Amino acid sequence: MNLIYLSLGSNLGRRQQHIEEALKLIQNRIGGIEHVSRFYESEPWGFSSAYNFCNCCLALRTTIDPLPLMDRLLEIEHEMGRRRDGMGYSDRVIDIDMLFYGDMQMDHPRLKLPHPSMGDRRFVLAPLAEIAPQFIHPVVGISITQMLQACTDQSDVVPLTPE
């Protein structure tokens, strides 16, 4: 069983309910969820929008290899109404990113592991530090807590749910 970390986000409609639905689909189709962070609210990153995001991170265990796992995550996004137009960042019902697949490093046209820009995104690092503070990034060699402390992104990332 491989330990996987995912980041989920939604900024359209009933954001928290969209994430809860995605969590159920992941649990049923991919593997056992071990930890889920609190939900956080954050400003859009990489584009302008009137709608803030709800984000969380989760840890799960699965036997599914990385590329088929990515396919299943994309199927869940599509089923929930996510449409990718190839035009960059935009508002979305659901976004699911694979952050880590154990300590695997992969540079495939469809999937890069660890996620290459997670260290620049406070909305990813804050919830991830909640569930995996001592996890060591296999490329940069520091913990998630240290990555959060070093993150230059100053966006507001505020817990929506209590500890």
Image (spheres, rainbow, N blue to C red):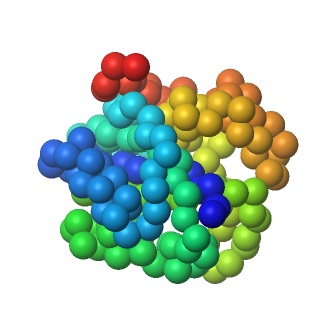
Q: Can you say which quadrant of the picture contains the N terminus?
A: bottom right
Compared with 115, 150 (above or below) is above
Q: Mark yes or no: residue 152 visible.
A: no
Query: Is residue 156 shown left or right of residue 81?
Result: right
Give coordinates of residue 33: x percent, y percent: 45, 51
- Indicate the quadrant containing the C terminus: top left, top right, bottom left or bottom right: top left
Residue at left offset 44%, top offset 35%: 37
**Vertical arrangement, residue 46 with respect to residue 162, above or below:** below
* Residue 39 position by quadrant: top left
Q: Is residue 95 left or right of residue 130?
A: left
Residue 54, x across and y down, in percent: 32, 39
> How many numbered circles are shown?
0
142 is higher (above) or lower (below) than 29: above
| x and y percentages locating residue 129 in the rendered image | 59, 32
For the question of whether residue 19 can be seen, the reply is yes
Residue 91 in the image: x percent, y percent? 29, 55
Q: In percent of the image, x 66 and y 67: which residue is there?
A: 112
Q: Residue at x 75, y 63 (%)?
A: 104
Residue at x-position 65% and y-position 43%: 119
Outermost left residue: 13
Considering every residue shown, the one lying at the far top of the view is 162
Residue closer to the observer: 2 or 103: 2
